[in-house]
Image (cartoon, rainbow, N blue to C red):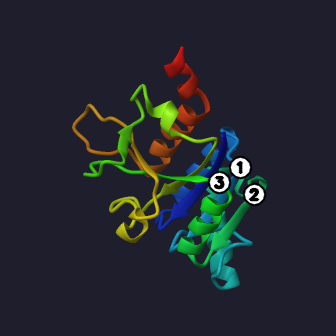
Amino acid sequence: MEIVLILHNIRSTYNVGSILRTADGFSVDQIIYSGFTPAPIPHSTLLPHLAEKITNQIHKTALGAEKTLLSSYSQDIIDSIHTLKAQGYQIVGLENNLKDTLLHQITEHSLPNLLGSKVALILGEEVEGISSELHRFIDLFLEIPMSGQKESFNVSIATAILLFYLRYGINLNQS
């Protein structure tokens, strides 16, 4: 499966770094930064001294993955989504507590049949999730079931769980 991660409006440099390290570990094909997501050099649009500070913060958790992953910054995320769709990518949103018929839990046995061979996974802002303006472009929403008191995982942890599922869990469900 080809996987592109879209980091849209992620606030924390440490979450970005953790996601990048996880993405490297699961052989994600490409990272796209968008919105106000802090991006490392050379994708940062900040003044040089601020870009260096942000890059150093990301590096604390990415541990070099920010340099090894194919990545870009999108000035127009909707245009980027259209480009990915034209390239055959299925646009998948990682969400929870969403009232939408396109929402599926990753534990559903039929889910492998709904996923294509090319997936662009949108990760949204830590508290509010994926901005509603992007919902109309998403082909499928995925949710990680929760059984504790909390309603959601940290975005970097949720990304790790979902990437593990996409790389290995699909095969586990089919056996």
Q: Which residue is mark 1?
A: 29
Quadrant location of residue 107?
A: top left
Residue placed furthest toward the right:
68
Q: Residue at x 66, y 64 (%)?
A: 56
**Image position, residue 62 (x, y; %):** 65, 52
For disc 3, the neighbor class at 10 Å (few under 14, some 14 to 19, many from 20) is: some
Comes first in the chain, label 3 or label 1: 1
Quarter in which the N terminus is drawn: top right
> For the point 50% across and 74% down, which residue is it?
36
The residue drawn where x is 64% and y is 67% is 83
Q: Amino acid at mark 2?
A: Leu
Q: Secondary structure at mark 1?
A: loop
Q: Position of residue 153 (x, y in %)?
A: 37, 44
Where 31 sits versus 160, above or below? below
Give the distance between the C-alpha atoms of the residues marked 3 and 2, in whole angstroms. Answer: 19 Å
127, 48: nearer the viewer = 127
Crowd tier of the residue under label 1, counting other residues whose Cα lies within 10 Å: few below 14, some 14–19, many 20 or above? some
Asked if disc 3 and disc 2 are in contact, CB closer than 8 Å, the reply is no
In the image, farthest residue toward the left? 149
Upstream in sequence: badge 1 or badge 2:
1
Q: Tag 3's secondary structure?
A: loop
Residue 158 % position (x, y)? 45, 43
**Amino acid type indicated by mark 3:** Gly
Which residue is tagged 3? 88
Label 2 Cα crowd, 10 Å radius (few <14 / some 14-19 / many 20+): some
Label 3 to label 1: alpha-carbon separation: 14 Å
